[in-house]
Amino acid sequence: MKPKKILKLAALNIGIVLFNIILFGVVGIQLNGADALRTAAGGAAIFLSISFFLYGNYTLLSQNDTQININEIDDYRDCIIALNQSYGKKAFDESITTIKEQVERFKKKKEKIFEILGQKFDVIDKVYEKFKTTIFDVEYVFLSNIKAILNKINAFDEEDYERLCRDISQKKFSDEVIASKKNIYKEYFIFVKNAIEDNEEIIIKLDALLLEISKHSTIEAGEIENMKEIKEMDELIKKSRYYI
């Protein structure tokens, strides 16, 4: 459950409690008393409180988190929601589909690695901890690359890009002006392409790491830093800092 939804639920229920405290404690409304008007008001207050409680909680709990801010992406589910939200710009729809496939592949490989690590090592083992740290660092970069891609796609003005394409065919502006505008939009495409390729490299290296781990029955803590796959992952992480 999202923190915002938890806060809304807490605010709703605290508000209902305070409402009843004020009515029954301060105003003096009663459920059973000599004053028929106050008793009726008390019954109405309880009915309203129960109604607000049931309706409010049901409404908030049944709301689907179908909209998400890119900077709030925390996991794969958020990632897929944000990617689905970004469909609609023809220039990048195919890229979004590719990224969604990458998310599913990364998730499966990560789960498989931890499954094998769990079979070979105890979760408090230093070797297990070192692998976990590396994989989580890679995951952070992977998700950060996707956030950067989505920010670029959302910033992309498709209408202006289509206008540019028409201007080129109609030779509406000078070659210098057209070239300047083309270079701006070229940067969008290059950025998205490079970030997707970086994530593909991460998945490939993750797959290689999975293969290497499956080969060994035991691995010493000191051996991990010298593993080719770990070194290559570290290099990918350093290179990908450009997108974070």
Image (cartoon, rainbow, N blue to C red):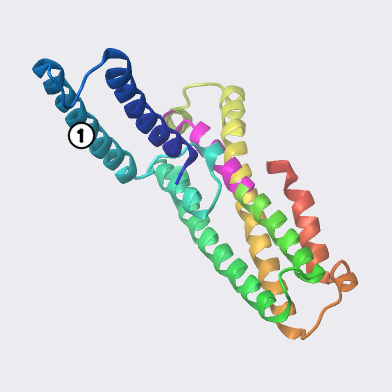
Q: Which residue lies furthest to the front in this view?
A: 34
Left or right of 44, for residue 240: right
Compared with 55, 93 (above or below) is below
Q: Give the range drawn in magenta.
A: 144-159
Towards the viewer: 45 or 6: 45
Callout 1: SS: helix
Q: Where is residue 55 in the image (x, y as percent from the top left)?
A: 23, 37
Q: Read off the residue under disc 1.
A: 51
Q: Is residue 204 one of those drawn in magenta?
A: no
Q: Name the amino acid type tagged 1.
A: Ser
Question: What residue lies at 58% left-to-right and 69% top-to-bottom?
Answer: 111
Left or right of 175, for residue 90: left
Classify the position of the C terminus by image quarter.
top right
Q: Is residue 153 one of those drawn in magenta?
A: yes
Compared with 96, 220 (above or below) is below
Left or right of 70, for residue 115: right
Compared with 127, 22 (above or below) is above
Callout 1: few (<14), some (14-19), or many (20+) C-alpha neighbours within 10 Å? few
Left or right of 48, for residue 13: right
Quarter assignment of residue 149 = top right
Q: Where is residue 123 in the image (x, y as percent from the top left)?
A: 71, 70
Q: Position of residue 91 (x, y in %)?
A: 46, 43
